[in-house]
Image (cartoon, rainbow, N blue to C red):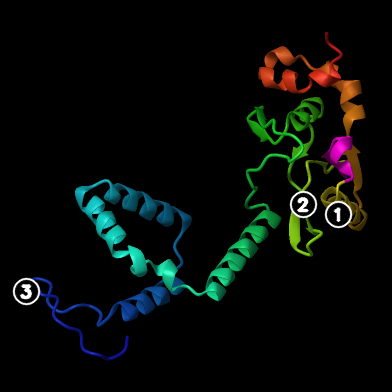
Amino acid sequence: MCSIETSLSGSIHTGYREFCSITCCAIYNQQISAKTPRTLESKIKQKKAFQEFLKTSKGKKYLKNLSISRLGKNNPCHKQTRESKANGIKKQSEAIKLKIKNGEFTPCVTNSWCRSRIEIYNIPFRSCWEAVFYILNPNLEYEKIRIPYIDDNKIEKIYITDFVNNDDKIIYEIKPKSVRNTTKNILKEKAAIKWCIDNGYQYICISDEYFLENAHKIDYNIFDPKLKKSMKQFLNEN
């Protein structure tokens, strides 16, 4: 890579080293990777092979030596400046936002207004309200539309809408009255309405009234007991 002579490896069987330095080795590997990008299958295969290696005595020794070599001031994180750390965090944040926007990644969070995550029909819903709405409207798609919006701190975020009916071109958002008029939700709703206007869709917010009228239409005995418990306020049961 740089025309510098390589040194002996220390073994008569292996002879001279292939590279003069780690830097040249890294440059060579980068060039090879650029010419022949690895497939997903090869990446998975390599990952599994490395995981199996770490289970061996050599692998455990490797991890131990690596841990020792990174103690104290030798930890690479200590060599980062505040600027490089901030840039790293910014790049990571932008990469995650792009994946969310493109539908490649969905954050595993629970709605701030409801902590009742539940799985129905093998679909993990963020709230029981969403689960009930889907049971009553199984033709809808869940969390398929992603809309960029600017929050109150002037930071771009991605709003993942709850449901969409692409045949009738309607977006449904499940939101109780108590939180609909918060600053965050107002900004998200404005962005969604604009997106709907630009794309010929209709935006409908599903709130308390819908569940008062329809929650009783479900046979809760065939679902997780948590579902009925969460909807008890709408069932008029003593």
Q: Are marks 3 and 1 in contact (CB under 8 Å)?
A: no
Residue numbers of the magenta segment = 168-181
Callout 2: SS: strand
Residue under the point 13% across and 80% down: 8
Q: Residue 187: which disc?
A: 1
Q: Residue 12: which disc?
A: 3
> Mark 2 or 3, which is nearer the eye?
2
Q: Residue 159: which disc?
A: 2
Above or below, comparing residue 151 to residue 9 in the picture: above
- Kind of residue sitting beneath label 1: Leu
Residue 162 occupies which quadrant of the picture?
Answer: top right
Above or below, comparing residue 126 to residue 120 in the picture: below
How far apart, in angstroms, are the residues tagged by discs 2 and 3? 62 Å
- Kind of residue sitting beneath label 3: Ile
Q: Position of residue 192 (x, y in %)?
A: 86, 52
Residue under the point 67% across and 32% down: 117
**Mark sitting earlier along the chain (2/3):** 3
Callout 3: SS: loop
Q: Residues within 10 Å of mark 2 (few under 14, many from 20)?
A: many
